[in-house]
């Protein structure tokens, strides 16, 4: 059964559709999971800490005093006197760079509130002190969900991309090895068609070139064989009369007493032998 092939444009379109479908499906699944998780009763709303902090601020204002004992969890504070001396701070506040920068801004420019992304910075003052507060608006696992979403999208793109690269690379190597084999005069080699139309067109062109090369080689072989046959016939035709000439020259040399004629006969013998040796060499070469 002949392998089905697709054009590169069709392959790229399929790749884009697959990636888009995977990303869309993954986002839908993650959205459904997120809705299920965040709809549970034990999952606090995104502004839960903000509500607690605002309620605590209102309570302190009503009482006219700052009560850090009831300060909400999941928020940081640094409590200072008006002269800048530290009164008290939450456990992690000393390492909260954003809160420390907010305090510097307040001390220099009297900035009483600042919002950076989902980080909120505010203050509460009484007659003798000021407390600097920091809290975050958002879900507890909001960043974890975003990281998982990014990782899933990256995988949705990477996996089809790797498979596409492997598919194209395999087909290219297959065609390349075939072309190298033809270039090495291995004309008996063959190749199966790939699943990429453009590369199959290359294979067809190489096959056509190979057929032409085989045909030319066959024609040359036939011509060489014909040349050998003709050379063998010519050599054989020359060998017979030369043998006769040599025989007659030998008779003249044996029966002739005249020295000049004997030299002429000897010259005929020597030259006929040289021609015969040349003919034998030609016949030997033609046999190879």
Image: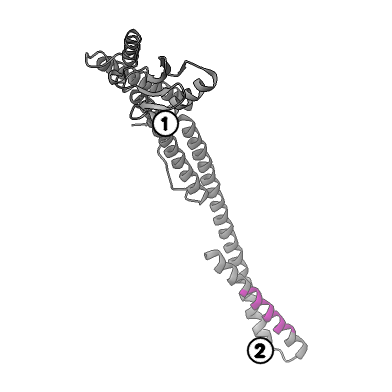
Q: Is residue 194 visible?
A: no
- Residue 120 drawn at (x, y percent): 42, 18
Q: In the structure shown, which secondary structural element does the residue marked by tag 1 occupy?
A: helix
Q: For the N terminus, give its image quadrant.
A: top left
Q: Which mark is residue 254?
A: 2
- Range drawn in magenta: 264-277
- Residue 75 drawn at (x, y percent): 34, 21
Residues 76 and 282: in front is 76
Name the residue rendered at 59%, 57% in the picture. 227
- Residue 175 drawn at (x, y percent): 46, 40
Taking the magenta stretch, the answer to whether it contains residue 164 is no
Name the residue rendered at 50%, 17% in the picture. 111
In three-dimensional space, the C-alpha distance between marks 2 and 1, rounded to whole angstroms, equals: 96 Å
- Residue that sits furthest to the left in the current view: 41
Q: Is residue 18 above or below residue 41?
A: below
Q: Which image quarter: residue 80?
A: top left
Q: In the structure shown, which secondary structural element does the residue marked by tag 2 occupy?
A: helix
- Residue 243 drawn at (x, y percent): 61, 75
Q: Which residue is mark 1?
A: 161
Residues 220 and 164: in front is 164
Q: Which image quarter: residue 232?
A: bottom right
Q: Is residue 22 visible?
A: yes
Name the residue rendered at 42%, 39% in the picture. 170
Residues 151 and 103: in front is 103
Taking the magenta stretch, the answer to whether it contains residue 271 is yes
């Amino acid at each position: 059964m002949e392998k089905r092939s697709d054009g590169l444009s069709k392959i790229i379109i399929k790749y884009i559709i697959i990636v888009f479908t995977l990303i869309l499906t993954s986002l839908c699944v993650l959205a459904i999971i997120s809705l299920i998780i965040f709809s549970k009763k034990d999952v606090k709303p995104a502004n839960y800490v903000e509500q607690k902090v605002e309620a605590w601020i209102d309570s302190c204002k009503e009482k006219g005093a700052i009560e850090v004992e009831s300060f909400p969890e999941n928020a940081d504070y640094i409590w200072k006197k008006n002269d800048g001396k530290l009164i008290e701070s939450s456990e992690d506040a000393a390492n909260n760079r954003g809160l420390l920068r907010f305090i510097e801004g307040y001390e220099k420019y009297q900035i009483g509130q600042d919002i950076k992304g989902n980080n909120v910075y505010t203050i509460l003052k009484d007659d003798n002190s000021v407390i600097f507060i920091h809290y975050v608006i958002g879900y507890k696992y909001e960043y974890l969900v975003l990281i998982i979403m990014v990782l899933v999208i990256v995988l949705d793109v990477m996996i089809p991309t790797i498979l596409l690269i492997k598919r194209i690379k395999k087909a290219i190597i297959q065609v390349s090895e075939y072309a190298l084999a033809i270039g090495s005069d291995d004309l008996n080699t063959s190749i199966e068609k790939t699943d990429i139309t453009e590369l199959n067109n290359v294979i067809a062109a190489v096959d056509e070139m190979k057929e032409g090369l085989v045909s030319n080689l066959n024609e040359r072989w036939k011509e060489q064989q014909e040349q050998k046959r003709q050379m063998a016939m010519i050599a054989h035709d020359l060998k017979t009369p030369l043998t006769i000439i040599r025989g007659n020259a030998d008779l003249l040399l044996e029966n002739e007493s005249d020295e000049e004629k004997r030299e002429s006969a000897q010259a005929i013998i020597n030259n006929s032998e040289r021609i015969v040796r040349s003919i034998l060499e030609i016949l030997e070469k033609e046999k190879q």
